[in-house]
Image (cartoon, rainbow, N blue to C red):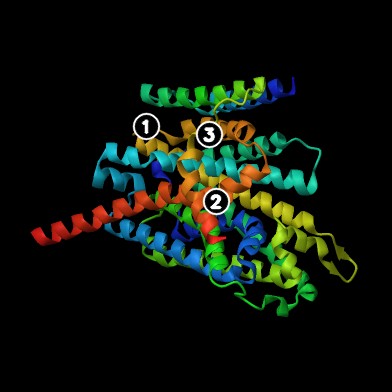
Amino acid sequence: MERYIVIIVAFGYVYFFDYLHVKKKGSKKDMSIYLVLILLSLYMGVDYVMNRDWIDYYDVFEPLFKGTAREIDSFLK
Amino acid sequence: MSDRKPEQQEISSFQLGVIFFAYMTGSSIINIPGPLIGRAYNGAWLSLLISGALGFCILACILFLNQRYPGLSFVECGQRLIGTWLTIMISIFTLSFLLQMISGIVLDIGLFMVSSMMRETPLYVFTFLAFAISAATAYAGIEVIARMFTLIAIVLLLMIGLVLVLALNHYNPSSLLPIMPDGMKPILHGAYFTFGFPYVEVFLIAMLLPFVSKETSPKLPRTLLTSLALNVLIICISSICTIMAFGPLAGKRPYALFSLAHIVEFQEIVQRIESIIGISLILGSFMKTTVTLYVLSLYLTQLFKLSDNRIFIMPLALLGFMITLVGFDGSAEWTEIVSVLHPIWGSAAFVVPLLLVMVVAIFKGKILNGKS
């Protein structure tokens, strides 16, 4: 229940703020990018609410740099 | 809130210098000394000089591009020099790291508050509030940010200075020696860590240079160099004071200035002033998050030639908040991301694109000079 409230408040704040302040809608390109960002947030929101541990942000980028970074770090220790 | 469009807003070079100083110093003055001393021991200040020198090199590259192409941000320079598609390709890591930065800074506020001051409060309370306020401030525009941050930066410096001065009777200068008992490797290890956070982040200023008014732009290089030098000096002083106060135990404390404030006792009246450092961390991190969020929205807007960066501030803040909810799996993994991954990720995100664009700018300049 707590997690649902957190997600509703977060999305609600964004919707409320943008409804009040984003007076004119952007172009189709703007709205597509906006939608992509909201969908990514929604994906993570569902992951959080259902507590599934799906692929997250660090799971995508960490493997790209982890090997080299760890080698440098252990060399310098 | 400024009603002027982002491209119409102007700030002076002094204001940009303040913004630069605020986001470079903001959270790093609280977070850097402890872990840095844990890696570099008494040579922590040497590590800062090395990584600070690299920061100066990054700043020099940015100022070179600004001199060659005045009034253009880094993205606009890239689009002019290497084309839109190549700029998008080299910016994938840049966008990813900018997003990681805003999540990391805010997560840091939450972790500090949960570990030091308010242990029972859930992490998301702090992260949500931080994102909400930072996003609203970023939405207000660069002029509002500059005006606000001038005052906040002064308050931040005064509070940190107060703690460092009041702790005078706890300092033992003999703790500073020997400087390099284990040779050069710990110094380089510390420099590697501090390059990842905060000195690689000098890059962000490349997106804010177009906002400087033409009248004050001649003073810009000197102002930015002074801001960076002041940042290096202040973090060095904090690290040295921490070593003098705690000796070999300085490296064991993740929030060294917080621990320093904890032991301050002046005339039995001024005691337990660590809440001042808590306030400083929140103020500093708020400034850094706001600037980073603003830069991220600008970068995205210019990269994909969108109309108004303000449309994307809230969804980007929401995305950052979601990353703090699901991406954070524990302190040990988080420490590894910040201390081990950040330098490489930051280099791929900021240094490589900057060097590429700069090299093309140099060659294009030589070709044009040759033709003329």
From mark 2 to mark 3, how far is it between C-alphas?
A: 16 Å
Residue pictured at 24% horizontal, 47% vertical: B81
Residue B251 lies, with reference to residue B237, above or below; the image says above
* Residue B299 x/y as whole percent: 41, 41
| Front residue of B71 and B301 | B301
Marks 1 and 2, Cα distance to the nearest angstrom? 35 Å
Q: In this view, does B355 lie to the left or right of B22?
A: left
Residue at image coords 59%, 47%? B336
Residue sitting farthest toward the right: B268
Between B241 and A33, the residue placed more toward the observer is B241
Q: Mark 3 lies on which chain?
A: A
In the rendered structure, the answer to whether residue B258 lies left or right of residue B63 reads right
Chain of the residue under the numbered disc 1 shown in the image: B
Q: Residue at horizontal 63%, vertical 70%?
A: B237
Instruction: Sort mark 3 into few (<14), some (14-19) or many (20+) by Cα contacts within 10 Å.
Output: few
- Give residue B36's position: percent from left, percent from top: 62, 61
Tag 2: residue type?
A: Val
Disc sitting over residue A59 in the figure: 3
* Pointer 1 or 2: first along the chain: 1
Q: Which amino acid does label 3 sit on?
A: Asp
Please tell me whether mark 2 sits on a helix, a strand or a loop: helix
Question: Disc 3 vs disc 1: which is toward the camera?
Answer: 3
Please give the residue where the numbered disc 2 appears in the rendered image: B340
Mark closer to the observer (1, 2): 2
The residue type indicated by label 1 comes to Leu
Q: Where is residue B194 in the image (x, y as percent from the top left)?
A: 54, 59
Which residue is identified by label 1?
A: B306
